[in-house]
Amino acid sequence: MIVQQIQYENFRNHNFITFQPEGGVNLVYGSNGSGKTTLLEGIHYCALTKGFNNATDSECLAFDSDFFKLESTFLTKLENPVTVKVTYSKGRDKQIIVNNGDVKPFSRHIGTVPCITFSPSEIVIVNGAPADRRRFLDNAISQTNRRYLDDLLTYRRVLQQRNILLIQLHEKKNIDNDILSIWNEHLSRLSASIVHARIQFLTLFSHIFFEMYSQLSTKESPFIIYRSSIGIIDSRISSSDLYSLFLRKCEESKSAEIFRSQTLIGPHRDDLLFLLNGKEVKKYASQGQLRTFLISIKLAQHRYVDQMLGEKPLCLLDDIFSELDSSRIDDIFSILETCGQSIITSTEKRGNGKISSISLKILQLKKGSKIVKN
């Protein structure tokens, strides 16, 4: 998958600009505030229907503008064009049109344009809260597994309704306790499907990740553990066994859940534990190790999506160079050369060492929405 062209109108600090990256590795450099990250965010919008870091649509409006518009053309591995148009106006819903057809709900578009991102703020995947790691899991699996995304969206609705019921039971309203059993069944079935998909994903993903990490560092041994709200789970467990386990745990935690008025069991409470040489990464790793760990996760995600879909996802890498030595940067570029189209942003032009030996396209973004080829 490559992006052939994308036009930005009133999108953040770009009033109007056309971006036409080439295949392979593209380096876009420019001063702070020139709009480098905005270029990537527009592509991210067209691929995944939203901006970086869960930015709201209104936050992406250019100053003093009432609307923004993104028009893009992508090309698949088989050279089939995919056109995506995103429009947003104040007081109106966002609209996404793919190949001239209106897309609703937006979740239907996920996976059409596979896309992997790296931005400094995503370091929270490694050292942030459990919700940040769950968000990574959900994004990674949803791009390759439609059922997972559907189950996840349904699960969130069931979870919300079940929590409302728990509040009512806590307040001792006249509610039939049998109703909770019905919601337990719904929740358990969805929980089993979601957790089973996550475990299957991690079984394959972990092998790819270990291999990727070894290409960037030979000094440390990484490991990933899935922490479930129902305890340690064997990777060979079936979905039906998980369902029975979740159902039993729901019954066991019934009193505690009513007392606290919230659901204590389920994939919404799960986490990933990242280790280096047996020590927890978020507690003991240096900034360089944290960034290398995250980059390895992202590169492994790229290879995973490629294996599952047979389509290399777009690679959008924002400010990837900070806190990395030149040798590690060279290794990253060597890997990216095999990843299809990559678009990288930097505050400075780079082209030394191994970088100069690969097919690197260098573009400069100047303030005033102007892109210059070097």
Image (cartoon, helix red, strand yellow):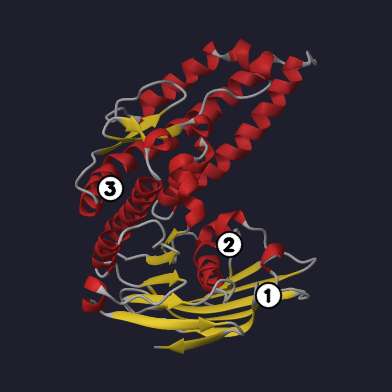
Residue 222 is situated, as x and y percent measured from the top left of the image, at: 27, 39
The residues bearing labels 2 and 1 have C-alpha atoms spaced at a distance of 13 Å
Name the residue beneath numbered marker 1. Answer: 68
On the rendered structure, is 94 left or right of 72?
right
- Kindly identify which numbered label has been placed on residue 278: none
Say which amino acid is labelled 3.
Phe
N-terminal of the pair, mark 2 or mark 1, is: 2
On the rendered structure, is 364 left or right of 217?
right
Name the residue beneath numbered marker 2. Answer: 51
The residues bearing labels 2 and 3 have C-alpha atoms spaced at a distance of 26 Å
Q: Is residue 255 above or below residue 270?
A: above
Crowding at mark 3 (Cα within 10 Å: few <14, some 14-19, many 20+): many
Name which residue lies at 39% across and 77% down. Answer: 349
Say which amino acid is labelled 2.
Gly
Number of residue marks? 3
Residue 104 is situated, as x and y percent measured from the top left of the image, at: 61, 61
Q: Is residue 267 above or below residue 75?
A: above
The N terminus, quarter of image: bottom left
Quarter of the rendering containing residue 224: top left
- Kindly identify which numbered label has been placed on residue 209: 3
Circles 2 and 3: CB distance less than 8 Å?
no
Name which residue lies at 55% across and 29% down. Answer: 186
N-terminal of the pair, mark 1 or mark 3, is: 1
